[in-house]
Amino acid sequence: MFHFSASSAVNLALAVLILFSLITWAMIFAKGWSQWQQRQANAAFAQRFWQAADLPAAEIAAKSGDGPLLRLAVAGFDTWRSLGERQTLAHAGDRQTVMERALSQQVKKEQHRLESGLMLLASIGSTAPFVGLFGTVWGIMNAMQNIAASGSSGLEAVAGPVGEALLSTAMGIAAAIPAVLAYNYGVRVTRLSVSEMEGFANDFLRLSSQPPAVHSPQSKAKTES
């Protein structure tokens, strides 16, 4: 009959928790670097956009660089240019409705991009303590069975196996804390980024709904402010 020893159960739990920790820290560094790059790209593009004389000049500024705001602007410019062309189902409706729909869809795409990896961090943060608890319970259960079989109840017979089993719970908590903190921080950054994109989308919608002759004064006023 196959016997799964206490050491095997605890070692398996510890291996899973070490893997969780490696994934968590890899995600923390990757997401942190990505978020820093996005902030820099958004700041650079916003400066170029609001320094443009009008929307056509701003469209030229959107042809270089990267970042969520730039991709949102490109989606807005593409829709803005296509409004004067042949109508399709994708552009059905009045001008403002079409622009709102295009910008809203792009914001959703960028939000999904920002949220990538957060679900993995949330899963690790919620399951790691239970994996550690599983190793502890299994280890203690086997330790008690061995003590009962050997008939020895001294401290030496109990401390070693129980201490080894409790290490699994400690590792589970240690793996969960960074994952939960990183997830909460990622959610906050995502909310702030989405709010920034929604504000830019509203400004873009306002500018695109004005006659061409009004674009330049509005843009200059925005730059001076």
Image (spheres, helix red, strand yellow):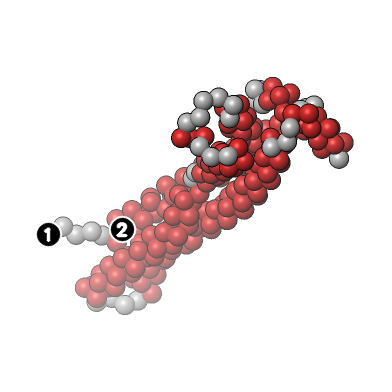
What's the residue at 19%, 59% (across, down)?
3
Label 1 SS: loop
Q: How far across and down, in percent of the image, does residue 202 sit?
A: 68, 44
Closer to the camera in the image, 176 or 189: 189
What's the residue at 69%, 22% (across, down)?
60
Height in image: 23 above or below 85? below
Label 2 SS: helix
Q: Earlier in the sequence, mark 2 or mark 1?
A: 1
Q: Decide if residue 114 is in sight here.
A: no
Q: Decide if residue 222 is in sight here.
A: yes
Q: How far across and down, in percent of the image, does residue 103 sit?
A: 59, 40
Q: How far across and down, in percent of the image, does residue 197 sit?
A: 64, 43
What residue type is disc 1 on?
Answer: Met
> Separation of disc 2 and disc 1 at Cα?
17 Å
Q: Which residue is mark 1?
A: 1
Q: Which mark is residue 91?
A: none
Q: How far across and down, in percent of the image, does residue 112 sit?
A: 51, 44
Closer to the camera in the image, 93 or 117: 93
What residue type is disc 2 on?
Answer: Ala
Crowd band around label 2 with a 10 angstrom C-alpha radius: few (<14), some (14–19), many (20+): many
Closer to the camera in the image, 103 or 37: 103
What's the residue at 73%, 36% (across, down)?
210
Q: Which residue is mark 2?
A: 9
Number of callouts in the render? 2
What's the residue at 53%, 40% (across, down)?
93
Residue lying farthest right? 224
Crowd band around label 1 with a 10 angstrom C-alpha radius: few (<14), some (14–19), many (20+): few
